[in-house]
Image: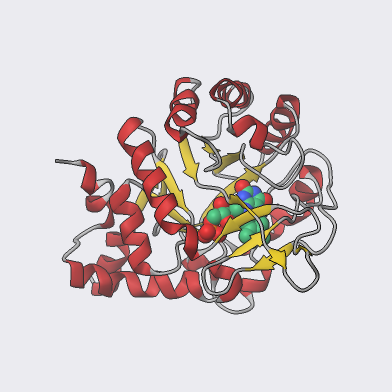
Amino acid sequence: MGTKIKNMNRLKVTLSGITLANPIIPASGTYGFGDEFAELYDINCLGGISFKGTTREARYGNPLPRIAECGNYGMINAVGLQNPGVEHVIAHELPRLKSHYNGCIVANVSGFSVQDYVETCALLDKEPIDILEVNISCPNVHNGGMAFGTSPEAAAEVTAAVKAVTTKPVYMKLSPNVTDIVAIAKACEAAGADGLCLINTVFGMRIDIRRRRPVIANRYGGYSGSGIFPLALRMVNQVACATSLPIIGCGGVSSAEDVIEMMMAGATAVEIGAANLTNPMVAKEIIDRLPALMEELKIEKLTDIIGIVNHE
Ligand SMILES: Cc1cc2nc3c(=O)[nH]c(=O)nc-3n(C[C@H](O)[C@H](O)[C@H](O)COP(=O)(O)O)c2cc1C
């Protein structure tokens, strides 16, 4: 076997029977449908792509400004699920993505009622997507999903309702803005979820001290980027210890070292969000760096380290 093929096999991971060439997935909302990135590099190097959150109807999002920078430790966004609606996504975005990308397509879905989630997921069920990532954790729109992700009962209700209308693996995307993320994760597992994705952004705020006003028009927003990495890692580890579902780890990942750490905490795949916005090459750079880092850390296959800190 050539060294290149051997290296490629060492990076493979499997989510609910779907094999990804490597665990790297750009996170929803930070990669669009990949078009801008495809101009910079061959996006077929990615294990998967989680596309911008779609909803039943088109949404224009929140008033501007929607972004507050937080130095080199991250950013706050309050985009508010701006998207063209699921029917447009199915008619235009998905065929275009599918025409130039062969990896795992993760369809990120949001809703404002259980019925919204059900209708959007039912429409996507007939489409060439691999995983439904159900966002019950958007902090940026009133009643925009986070209401479902902060109560175990509501999280279970959305999970069961979506499972009933789809044959695709259903991954529930959890919010860190809760007292006990394990309770929410377990409720999703009991309701039939196939996997979990965590975390979404952390509810945050910045103030413009010269103008004496919140930076973000909506006042608060979702904080993401390297500053949230330890929090995300802790939550992934807690959930990995308490459930037997595969986990897509997300939150503050910006290097190959972070990916290894996230997998050691219990993630099977790893999403990269805000880092794409500061360095559009980051996902490819991480994939390219992984084999050398694995060599250095004496990791034969990435699957060997998933949740390794939990096996005592
Ligand atoms: C500008 C922006 C838009 C986002 N939009 C979505 C979205 O539509 N759906 C979703 O589930 N998460 C969305 N997120 C959250 C990210 O997918 C990710 O969960 C979060 O940013 C934490 O990862 P990070 O620290 O690597 O950015 C968005 C994040 C950012 C920064």
Which residue appears farthest toward the bottom when viewing the image?
40
Q: Position of residue 72 (x, y in %)?
A: 53, 74
Residue at 24 percent across and 52 percent down: it is 305
Q: Position of residue 137 (x, y in %)?
A: 61, 40
- Which picture quadrant has residue 155? top right
Q: Is residue 166 above or below residue 89?
A: above
**Is 202 on the left or on the right of 303, as rendered?**
right
The C terminus, quarter of image: top left
Q: Is residue 104 above or below residue 55?
A: below
Q: Is residue 306 above or below residue 288?
A: above
Q: Position of residue 177 (x, y in %)?
A: 56, 41
Which one is in front, 108 or 97?
108
Q: Is residue 258 above or below residue 146?
A: below
The N terminus, quarter of image: bottom left
> Which quadrant contains ligand 1?
bottom right
Residue 51 showing in the rendered view: no
Which one is in front, 8 or 221?
221
**Is 75 on the left or on the right of 264, as rendered?**
right
Residue 279 showing in the rendered view: yes
- Count of numbered marks: 0
Residue at 58 percent across and 32 percent down: it is 150
Residue at 60 percent across and 69 percent down: it is 70
**Is 52 on the left or on the right of 241, as rendered?**
right
Which one is in front, 192 or 125?
192
What coloring was used for the rendering?
Answer: secondary structure
Residue at 32 percent across and 65 percent down: it is 8
Q: Position of residue 265 (x, y in %)?
A: 31, 49
- Which picture quadrant has residue 162? top right
Which one is in front, 187 or 205?
205
